[in-house]
């Protein structure tokens, strides 16, 4: 199946609000590294089928909201630490209404069968492996029948570890679950549509990111 890859629509760098200085937002605007950061979001967005309601877990500054606004009638967001008022105000000024809350994927404050799509970009690797089942139980619960879960997680290779180290991150202190553990948990509760692999840029180091597309059957 050939999927059209959208271009990520970024706000101007000084428009974004709502997260602390540890947020990797600045990297999206850099050459080379920025291409890889944007590409992983674009590949996740390419798997989103559109519809009435989308929930992004871990939305941060709302990086994907300009694209999601073109695909869904309503945007919901859940994030552990983002400043809800600040992020909402940015998009209100652009005429984009959002429904944002602070909260955790393991215990989501939504009714069952609510969303066409649940989107999680670089979130699930931060959970402990023992927490993956609880996360996907909740994702399945809030999805409508035939709704989709789309997630992106890094594939840990020496190249990726080195890149994060250059950026000042020890990913062993940040990432606790591998792409295989995430996919295994997803398959317990949802039906696998496909896994998309993202290659490094330049393409010398193999797969560095993985996008999962799963359905609630």
Image: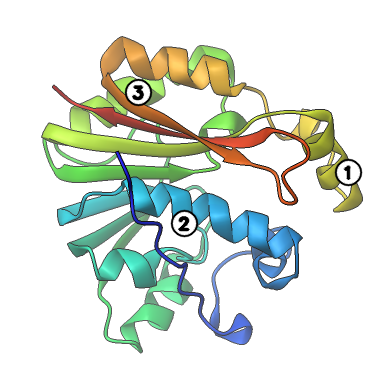
Say which element carries label 1.
Answer: helix
Q: CA distance from mark 2 to mark 1?
A: 24 Å
Q: Position of residue 75 (x, y in %)?
A: 26, 61
| Residue that badge 3 annotates | 136
Q: Which residue is found at the position 68% from the left and 30% from the top?
A: 175
Q: Which residue is found at the position 19% from the left and 55% from the top?
A: 50
Q: Position of residue 20 (x, y in %)?
A: 67, 64
Q: Residues within 10 Å of mark 2 (few under 14, many from 20)?
A: some
Image position of 158 with respect to 187: above or below: below
Quadrant assignment, res 17: bottom right
> Horizontal placement of 179 versus 105: left or right?
right
- Residue projecting furthest to the bottom: 93
Between 211 and 19, the residue placed more toward the observer is: 211
Considering only order in the chain, which callout, 2 or 3, is on the residue closer to the N terminus?
A: 2
Q: Is residue 89 visible?
A: yes
Say which element carries label 3.
Answer: helix
Q: CA distance from mark 3 to mark 2?
A: 23 Å
Considering only order in the chain, which callout, 1 or 2, is on the residue closer to the N terminus?
A: 2
The image's mark for residue 183 is none
The image's mark for residue 42 is 2
> Horizontal placement of 131 versus 98: left or right?
right
Nearer the camera: disc 2 or disc 1: 2
| Residue that badge 1 annotates | 165
Q: Residues within 10 Å of mark 3 (few under 14, many from 20)?
A: many
Q: Which residue is found at the position 77% from the left and 28% from the top?
A: 157
Quadrant assignment, res 112: top left
Q: Which residue is found at the position 72% from the left and 44% from the top?
A: 203
> Horizontal placement of 20 versus 111: left or right?
right
């Amino acid at each position: 199946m050939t999927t059209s890859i959208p271009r990520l629509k970024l706000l101007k760098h000084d428009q974004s609000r709502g997260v602390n200085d540890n947020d990797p937002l600045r990297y999206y605007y850099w050459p080379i590294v920025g291409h890889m950061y944007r590409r992983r979001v674009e590949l996740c967005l390419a798997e989103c089928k559109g519809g009435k309601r989308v929930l992004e877990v871990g939305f941060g500054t709302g990086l994907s909201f300009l694209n999601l606004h073109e695909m869904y009638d309503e945007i919901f967001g859940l994030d552990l630490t983002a400043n809800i008022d600040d992020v909402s105000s940015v998009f209100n000024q652009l005429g984009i209404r959002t429904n944002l809350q602070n909260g955790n994927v393991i215990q989501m404050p939504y009714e069952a069968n609510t969303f066409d799509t649940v989107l999680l970009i670089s979130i699930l690797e931060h959970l402990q492996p023992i927490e993956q089942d609880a996360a996907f139980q909740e994702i399945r619960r809030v999805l409508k029948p035939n709704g989709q879960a789309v997630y992106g997680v890094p594939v840990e290779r020496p190249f990726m570890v080195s890149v994060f180290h250059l950026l000042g991150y020890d990913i062993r202190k940040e990432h606790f679950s591998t792409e295989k553990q995430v996919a295994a948990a997803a398959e317990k509760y949802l039906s696998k549509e496909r896994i998309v692999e993202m290659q490094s840029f330049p393409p010398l180091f193999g797969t560095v990111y993985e996008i999962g597309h799963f359905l609630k059957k």
